[in-house]
Image (tube, coloured by chain):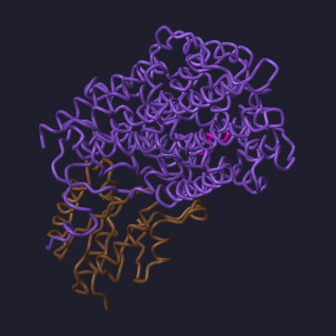
Chain colours: A purple, B brown
């Protein structure tokens, strides 16, 4: 027989990498069965436990909404204000850890073995990085956050910076410069190095232990260096179940809130009635599109939608940039970057601060939020990052998205702040963010004062919806892989189940109340995950040391 | 009549493919043509292999035992897919071109109600492939 494998199909010999020898076989705990016409291949017990506990929590939130709301409404702020120092320091450690990986020789380890080639080109890869975990936040907070810090009347000024308004809303000229500078620096702090370092750590751990060490693509694999063979038992079941739990509730609650935001936008722009019926229709529509996307798979669905979304987002970005005055915004962006580097150390130091409204209410909240999303986003990033070196990976997941996020904030926030300064009394942005607090409308208020408002607001609503679709479909892929014990080739009906289930949970919580309570619960999972992430840093380091020694 | 037969193989479920594989080998002997055994894998570790390289080795081992026991000329062809759950048809379509096969012999399940919603791999291949496709029921 002849040998055709060398130049067909397989990209190239994968080169040396150090496979972890373990007796665990992927799929050994799985149940492969047939229910009616549906073939299933699910992990026992992760699939069953996570499915049942999700149903139980939804039932609890629906049956005792007041109690659930009260408890989680208390738990979340208590955690973020009690452990603010812990969140801030952990995030700093993740950033430092990533930066060290760039400059040390460990950065030259290649994910997937020495000779692996990247699965995806830069454009598709970047598009997917944003689409999974951050796109929707950029739409929601792009105008809101900079303007809020610029003029907050609630005493949340970052580092106690001066307010540019008097008590009765008149502009104080000499304070504008300082307030604007700090607004951009403080917003960038939440969207640049720190969140991306959190995602990068989780993604790097999973990519390393999957592609180089040969362990299944599931969260527990990152813990192999710490727990050893025990990760295949209950230790691992608990880790995976927690990850599924946080991902599904994170997605379902944001889907519920997202439907409310999109509805608020539709009302603001078109006068569509703002009620639960419209929101349920929106959730069904988003879930339906996500369903088509997961059925089309990673390349034909998720990647394609992410790329389309990226193009639309850039069009909107450049429209706002030029319509609102590119000169001023780019100058302010330059100043914002300088301010970011000057202020990032005081902003990230949790000790001796008096601006607790900002530090606990925003920073610690954000860190808990990013961290609770990190299993999902990290696993998705890992799935699409094979073939990059660690250095390239960290630069591309940390530095470049950080710059893009900072630029986005400088454009959307900068344009909105310009509007507020130009006409404090007539500005719709000021009315929606500072005078009364209507977060979902902030973006549309800003777009409304630029030319072609009808068109750009429509594009804004479409972007919000499609970013939800890309979060929903990538999330379904991640949950399906975890609940199939790390199998990426599980039968199609399973991803259909998770995608639909997520939409149903969102609808149930929207109608019955409880979105807020369960979102608070998801963010509360950020605290245990922070400890887990610190352990993962150690595991990654150990893995890289062994990888270099063996190659 | 035919120049080369392609036989898609799922190494995890070889037992279920027995009839199709035997049929492919019988036809290969009848027309005295080689068989390309095609396996599709993901780049992430699967239940069969830690990486595509190891998968390629396993496929080769399978092909050599298959070729010896049936007395046919067999070659292994491993294809990598990002998302095998949905991309397997595309991967097999590409493999038809790459191997230059003009007959595909593959197994398929007994059709059920679900096939109205999404078709089987064999059905889809038969619908779209330019060459002949023989779908063998278990």
Is residue A527 something that shows in the picture? yes
Can residue A27 be seen? Answer: no
Residue A393 vs A238, above or below: the answer is below
Q: In this picture, is A157 found above or below B94?
A: above
Counting from the top left corner in percent of width and height, residue A369 is at 54, 27
In the picture, the quarter occupied by the N terminus of chain B is bottom left
Which residue corresponds to the image point at 83% horizontal and 44% vertical from the top-left?
A: A267
Residue occupying image coordinates x 56% and y 18%: A159
Residue drawn at x 78%, y 46% as measured from the top left: A449
Front residue of this view, candidates A438 and B25 = A438
Q: What's the magenta bit mostly, secondary-structure-wise?
A: helix
Whole-percent x and y of residue A438? Answer: 76, 31
Asked which quadrant contains residue A441, the reply is top right
Q: Which x, y percent locates residue A161?
A: 60, 19
For the C terminus of chain B, give its image quadrant: bottom left
Q: Which residues are magenta?
A: A499-504
Q: Quadrant of residue A165?
A: top right
Residue A503, magenta (yes or no): yes
Q: Is residue A362 magenta?
A: no
Return the residue found at the far bottom.
B1
Q: From the top left corner, tell me how far across and down residue A173 is, in percent.
A: 70, 28
């Amino acid at each position: 027989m002849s040998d055709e494998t060398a130049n067909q199909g397989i990209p190239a010999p994968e080169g040396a990498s150090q496979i972890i020898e373990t007796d665990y076989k992927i799929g050994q705990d799985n149940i492969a069965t047939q229910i009616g016409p549906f073939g299933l291949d699910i992990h026992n017990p992760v699939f069953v436990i996570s499915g049942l506990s999700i149903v139980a929590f939804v039932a609890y939130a629906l049956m005792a909404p007041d109690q659930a709301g009260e408890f989680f409404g208390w738990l979340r702020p208590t955690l973020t204000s009690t452990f603010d120092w812990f969140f801030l320091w952990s995030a700093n450690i993740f950033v430092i850890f990533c930066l060290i990986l760039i400059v040390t020789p460990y950065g030259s380890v290649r994910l997937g073995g020495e000779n692996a080639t990247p699965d995806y080109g830069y454009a598709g890869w970047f598009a997917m990085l944003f689409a999974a975990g951050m796109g929707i936040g950029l739409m929601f907070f792009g105008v809101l956050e900079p303007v809020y810090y610029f003029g907050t009347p609630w005493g949340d000024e970052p580092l106690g910076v001066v307010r540019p308004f008097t008590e009765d809303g008149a502009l104080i000229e000499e304070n504008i410069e300082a307030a604007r500078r700090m607004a951009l620096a403080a917003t960038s702090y939440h969207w640049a190095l720190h969140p991306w370092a959190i995602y990068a750590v989780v993604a790097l751990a999973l990519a390393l232990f999957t592609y180089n060490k040969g362990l299944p693509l599931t969260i527990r694999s990152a813990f192999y260096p710490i727990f050893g063979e025990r990760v295949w038992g209950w230790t691992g079941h608990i880790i995976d179940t927690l990850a599924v739990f946080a991902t599904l509730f994170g997605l379902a609650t944001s889907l519920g809130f997202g439907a409310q935001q999109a509805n608020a936008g539709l009302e603001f722009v078109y006068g569509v009635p703002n009620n639960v019926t419209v929101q349920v229709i929106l959730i069904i529509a988003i879930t339906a599109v996500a369903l088509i996307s997961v059925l089309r798979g990673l390349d034909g669905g998720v990647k394609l939608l992410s790329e389309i979304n990226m193009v639309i987002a850039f069009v909107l970005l450049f429209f706002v940039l030029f319509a609102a005055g590119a000169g001023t915004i780019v100058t302010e962006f330059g100043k914002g970057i300088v301010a970011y580097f000057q202020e990032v150390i005081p902003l990230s130091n949790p000790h001796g601060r008096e601006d607790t409204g900002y530090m606990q209410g925003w920073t610690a909240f954000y860190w808990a939020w990013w961290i609770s999303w990190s299993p999902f986003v990290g696993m998705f990033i890992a799935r699409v990052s094979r073939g990059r070196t660690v250095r390239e990976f960290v630069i591309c997941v940390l530095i470049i998205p950080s710059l893009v996020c900072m630029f986005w904030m400088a454009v959307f926030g900068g344009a909105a702040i310009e509007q507020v300064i130009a006409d404090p009394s007539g500005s719709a942005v000021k009315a929606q963010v500072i005078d009364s607090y209507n977060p979902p409308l902030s973006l549309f208020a800003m777009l409304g004062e630029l030319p072609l408002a009808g068109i750009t607001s429509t594009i804004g609503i479409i972007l919000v919806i499609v970013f939800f679709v890309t979060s929903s479909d990538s999330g379904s892929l991640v949950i399906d892989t975890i609940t199939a014990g790390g199998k990426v080739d599980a039968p199609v009906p399973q991803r259909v189940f998770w995608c639909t289930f997520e939409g149903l949970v969102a609808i149930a919580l929207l109608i019955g109340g409880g979105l807020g309570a369960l979102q608070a619960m998801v963010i509360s999972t950020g605290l245990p995950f922070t400890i887990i992430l610190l352990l993962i840093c150690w595991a990654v380091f150990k893995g890289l040391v062994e990888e270099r020694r063996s190659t | 009549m035919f120049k080369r037969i392609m036989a898609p193989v799922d190494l995890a479920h070889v037992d279920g493919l027995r009839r199709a594989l035997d049929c492919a080998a019988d036809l290969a002997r009848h027309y005295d043509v080689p068989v390309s055994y095609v396996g599709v894998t993901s780049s992430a570790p699967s239940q069969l292999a830690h990486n595509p390289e190891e998968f390629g080795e396993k496929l080769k081992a399978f092909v050599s035992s298959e070729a010896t026991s049936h007395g046919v000329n067999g070659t292994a062809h491993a294809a990598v897919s990002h998302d095998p759950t949905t991309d397997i048809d595309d991967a097999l379509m590409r493999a038809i071109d790459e191997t230059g096969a003009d007959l595909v012999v593959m197994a398929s399940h007994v059709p059920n109600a679900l096939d109205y919603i999404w078709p089987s791999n064999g059905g889809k291949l038969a619908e779209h492939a330019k060459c002949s496709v023989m779908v063998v029921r278990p």
